[in-house]
């Protein structure tokens, strides 16, 4: 019986020892005092990470990589951990909010000479009208991904999502702005409307559609479409490219009523501790060869005109990644919605999600 | 009757294990997509060991799970013994408080703990994640140990004291042996919950210290890589074998 | 709050402090004959104050304040009427303009709506169903495994928990791919001539996912109690002329109540706040209360945190009160104060 006590005592000791070791290792890992660093907060797998190695080779600046799951999580983390992040990759509408909350630092564009490579169309975007805080990293559209073996007719309008022929064969985005945006566009309104009556009309339209909808997904949609689980789905162009690559029967279209065009920019939080290093990294990412490398890795639309030139026909001939100017002209950026109006938006979305 | 019983158990276990089997099979798929079978291959297992992110997250996950299980088992078992002997009112209060972490949605627990760490200016990281894990593990340990205590003869502890045992001796030699199965169950539940937690970990650590769950969830946007399936399959098999071995040995010892 | 952080030695001091507290306690326990067992709970009392009570107070604080920190009941009014805050956000002038156009609040879809309450009731129903199913499936399983003649029992019971060592998200996705239209189950169904069925994106699929996830929490406590039960009691009952069912009904079942109560608690409470399962297996077409709360906390606007806090506070009080009621109904309780 003595033995049991001994064993327990040993176990506790061992645990304390492990804890101590972990603590030391852990703190050693967090505080890398050696030389220059830049703390990057990005979506997972949204960058060819070899690029970071190249960057470190050239500049000696070490890149600490951190990942977030959603824009909302990212906002929470940046708010509560000032100083932890030097370079962040939010979506456009978040940038607008971060600017309005003074969360971002103005970028010193003298340190970013490669900014001249960015397509002129994407400079001074709606979310950052004077282009003081952000540099575009990737961009894309929202549209319909459809399976050509299940859809015979030409797809060119959001209206097909309300066609009873495709009951239980439609996947919508489980995302308030995107899905309300689809209904608003279909009804001929702006995606950024502040008219309650228009929102109400869109809500009714979505509730009317709900019996036809197979599911509301975000991340799962692409795999479902690859597997042929649905005929039509509303997706981001990046996901569409991923799916088309895996299943040749799929095709992507931006409907004629217009849609959303989005940009994922790079920004520097106001509290960043290594602002100059972050600027160096932004400049590096805007270099044509590096932008090309990234674009070929994640295969989203590139904002970098010089990189597009390097990529040639592979890029320009692909209508999903490189939509025509008419299509783009038809599309809108999302604007941030102020908090009190967002409450109204949330109420309507909640009505859609809870309609039985 | 006996066969019916076995078939029943078999069916329930089948229900629990089919998704696991699917996961393991997918980890051998040469292609990246969940939907299409592109041939048998070990490539994802190879890629697994080359990825420093994954290896680092693995170490953090397992060490946190072990430590959290250990501390919460000690804390929880002692607490259960104490609470069991309390008078009615304080007992009711303690049990209600103990139920709170289970009733709060994970995200609320996670965010409220995050706020606690921010207000007290404790830097979030490995240690805070461990503290959070212990917090949500303990109630399960207590709920596993409690029924055993109730089954026990209420007077044996006092009898031991009357016979001259110190409280410590009575604890280790009278109470603990009786409730041991509950303690082991509690430890297993704690380990499991800790291994599986995403939400609370996410909000109580800094993004520099990632565990496997947070890594998997952050992959969701671009599609979860089969390397994660490979890792899960590997962890699953290793832990299962370890467990069965330990179990077998204790069985033998008992005989 | 940027540069304030706990120094390395701070962690050591805190650890040492806690260790010293425990050591002191142990030495006290060791020496003191007249020592009462409740002292054993004191480290956890300390723990629960810091890591449960204080965070709970934070939640309560949020639920009674607006984003500016002023005291308000609006978050609770919003629970009663899910459009309350939306109406409040609308400029009265604007409402008048719409009324001039002949559009009432009702036409605008902003009159009183009971979405939050309906969702809560629905979640309680789903959790109740899940608990009942887990009990019906789990009790016999635990009973079979606890049978002394069943040598494999102790090994098999462990197998109930092992599936959870795989990541929850991966497991749920695997479950989803099983139930898909072109999934494994449907392929089998087609092969045996039943034909393809719609298995996914309905309530049954959500319920299946919940049972799958929570079953071990029911089996374990029941198994534990049954396993430790004095088998001579049931033998005695048999000797006294009880048949199998009577023995079970009169001896085994009453004695296993503590385990059952533990199991119900461990299944029901987390089940009410389930989220994600409904999104993946229900296709996001139905929201449970957990989804609702999560959505509030993951909104880009911090305003929603207050509403989310109020929702979780209401739910917490509701569940704890109902468990308390159970204790009142059954004071000495075979449940004996577990709940």
Image (cartoon, coloured by chain):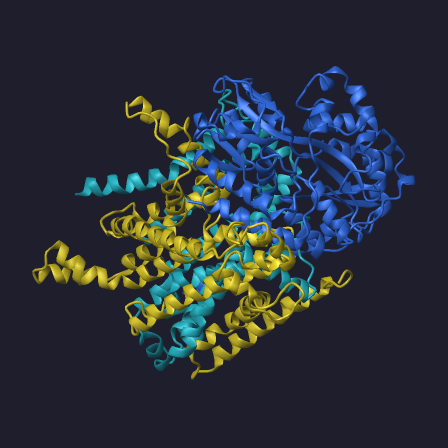
Colour used to depict chain C in the structure image: yellow
Q: Quadrant of the N terminus of chain C?
A: bottom right
Could you tell me residue C226's position as x and y percent?
Answer: 27, 58
Q: Is residue A230 left or right of residue A30?
A: left
Q: Is residue C67 left or right of residue C127?
A: right
Instruction: Judge whether C315 appears above or below A121 on screen.
Output: below
Residue at horizontal 76 percent and vertical 34 percent from the top: A137
Could you tell me residue C93's position as x and y percent?
Answer: 65, 58
Residue at horizontal 44 percent and vertical 25 percent from the top: A165
Q: Which of C265 and A99 is in front in this view?
A: A99
Quarter of the figure with residue B94? bottom left
Q: Which of C25 and B80 is in front in this view?
A: B80
Q: Quadrant of the C terminus of chain C?
A: bottom left
Q: Is residue A125 left or right of residue B153?
A: right
Residue at horizontal 86 percent and vertical 34 percent from the top: A115
Residue B27 visible, this orientation: no
Colour used to depict chain A in the structure image: blue
Could you tell me residue C136's position as x and y percent?
Answer: 27, 50
């Amino acid at each position: 019986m003595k033995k049991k006590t001994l064993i327990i005592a040993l176990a506790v000791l061992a645990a304390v020892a492990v804890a101590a070791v972990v603590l030391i290792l852990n703190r050693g890992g967090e505080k890398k005092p050696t030389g220059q660093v830049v703390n990057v907060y990005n979506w997972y797998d949204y960058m060819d990470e070899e690029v970071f190695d190249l960057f470190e080779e050239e500049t000696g600046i070490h890149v600490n990589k951190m990942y977030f799951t959603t824009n909302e999580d990212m906002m929470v983390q940046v708010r509560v951990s000032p100083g932890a992040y030097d370079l962040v990759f939010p979506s456009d509408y978040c940038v607008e909010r971060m600017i309005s909350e003074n969360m971002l630092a103005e970028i010193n564009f003298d340190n970013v000479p490669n900014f001249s490579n960015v397509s002129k169309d994407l400079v001074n975007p709606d979310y950052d009208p004077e282009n003081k805080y952000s540099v575009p990293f990737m961009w894309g559209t929202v549209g319909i991904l459809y399976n050509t073996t299940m859809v015979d007719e030409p797809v060119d309008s959001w209206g097909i999502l309300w066609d009873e022929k495709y009951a239980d064969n439609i996947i919508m985005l489980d995302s308030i702005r995107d899905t309300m945006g689809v209904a608003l566009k279909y009804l001929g309104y702006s995606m950024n409307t502040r008219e309650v009556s228009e929102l109400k009309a869109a809500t009714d339209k979505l509730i009317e559609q709900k019996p036809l909808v197979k599911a509301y997904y975000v991340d799962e949609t692409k795999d479902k479409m690859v597997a042929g689980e649905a005929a039509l789905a509303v997706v981001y162009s990046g996901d569409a490219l991923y799916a088309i690559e895996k299943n040749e029967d799929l095709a992507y279209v931006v409907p004629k009523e217009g849609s959303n065009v989005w940009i994922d920019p790079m920004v520097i939080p106001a509290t960043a501790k290594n602002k100059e290093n972050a600027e160096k990294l932004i400049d590096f990412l805007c270099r044509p060869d590096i932008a090309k490398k990234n674009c070929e890795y994640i295969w989203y639309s590139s904002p970098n005109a010089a990189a597009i030139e390097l990529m040639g026909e592979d890029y320009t001939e692909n209508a999903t990644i490189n939509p025509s100017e008419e299509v783009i002209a038809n599309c809108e950026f999302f604007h941030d919605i102020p908090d009190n109006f967002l409450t109204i938006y949330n109420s309507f979305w909640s009505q859609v999600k809870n309609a039985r | 009757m006996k066969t019916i019983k076995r078939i029943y158990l078999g069916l329930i276990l089948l229900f629990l294990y089919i998704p696991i089997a699917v996961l393991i099979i997918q980890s051998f798929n040469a292609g990246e997509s969940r939907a299409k079978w592109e041939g048998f291959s070990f490539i994802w297992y190879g890629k697994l060991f080359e990825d420093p992110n994954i290896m680092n997250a693995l170490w953090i996950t397992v060490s946190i799970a072990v430590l959290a299980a250990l501390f919460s088992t000690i804390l929880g078992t002692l607490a259960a013994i104490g609470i069991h002997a309390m008078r009615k009112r304080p007992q009711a209060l303690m049990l209600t408080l103990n139920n709170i972490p289970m009733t709060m949605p994970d995200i609320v627990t996670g965010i409220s703990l995050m706020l606690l760490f921010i207000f007290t200016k404790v830097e979030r990281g490995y240690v805070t994640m461990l503290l959070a894990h212990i917090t949500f593990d303990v109630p399960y340990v207590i709920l596993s140990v409690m029924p055993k205590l109730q089954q026990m003869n209420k007077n044996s502890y006092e009898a031991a004291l009357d016979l001259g045992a110190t409280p410590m001796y009575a604890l280790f030699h009278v109470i603990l042996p009786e409730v041991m199965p509950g303690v082991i169950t509690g430890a297993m539940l704690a380990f499991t919950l800790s291994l599986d937690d995403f939400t609370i970990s996410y909000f109580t650590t800094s993004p520099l210290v990632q565990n496997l769950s947070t890594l998997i969830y952050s992959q969701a946007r671009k599609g979860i890589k089969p390397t994660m399936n490979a890792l899960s399959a590997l962890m699953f098999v290793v832990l299962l074998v370890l467990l069965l071995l330990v179990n077998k040995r204790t069985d033998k010892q008992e005989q | 709050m940027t540069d304030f952080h706990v120094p390395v030695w701070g962690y050591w001091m805190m650890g040492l402090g806690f260790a010293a507290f425990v050591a002191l306690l142990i030495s006290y326990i060791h020496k003191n004959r007249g020592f009462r067992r409740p002292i054993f709970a004191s480290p956890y009392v300390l723990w629960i104050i810091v890591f449960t009570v204080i965070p709970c107070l934070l939640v309560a604080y949020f639920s009674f304040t607006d984003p500016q920190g002023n005291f308000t009941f609006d978050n609770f009014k919003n629970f009663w009427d899910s459009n309350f805050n939306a109406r409040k956000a609308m400029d009265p002038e604007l409402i008048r303009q719409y009324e001039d156009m002949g559009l009432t609040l009702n036409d605008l879809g902003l009159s009183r709506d009971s979405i939050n309450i309906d969702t809560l009731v629905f979640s309680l129903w789903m959790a109740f169903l899940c608990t009942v199913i887990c009990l019906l499936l789990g009790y016999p399983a635990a009973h079979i495994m606890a049978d002394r003649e069943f040598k494999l029992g102790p090994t098999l019971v462990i197998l109930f928990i092992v599936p959870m060592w795989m990541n929850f998200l991966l497991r749920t996705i695997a479950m989803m791919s099983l139930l898909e239209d072109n999934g494994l189950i449907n392929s089998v169904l087609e092969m045996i001539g039943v034909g393809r069925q719609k298995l996914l994106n309905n309530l049954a699929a959500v319920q299946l996912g919940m049972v799958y996830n929570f079953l071990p929490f029911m089996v374990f406590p029941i198994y534990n109690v049954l396993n430790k039960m004095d088998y001579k009691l049931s033998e005695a009952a048999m000797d006294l002329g009880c048949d199998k069912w009577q023995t079970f009904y009169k001896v085994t079942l009453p004695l296993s109540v503590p385990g059952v109560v533990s199991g119900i608690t461990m299944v029901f409470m987390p089940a009410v706040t389930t989220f994600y399962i409904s999104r993946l297996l229900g296709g996001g077409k139905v929201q449970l209360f957990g989804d609702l709360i999560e959505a509030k906390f993951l909104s880009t606007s911090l305003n929603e945190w207050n509403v989310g806090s109020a929702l979780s506070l209401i739910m917490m009080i509701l569940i704890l009160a109902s468990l308390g009621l159970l204790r009142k109904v059954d004071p000495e309780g075979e449940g004996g104060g577990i709940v």
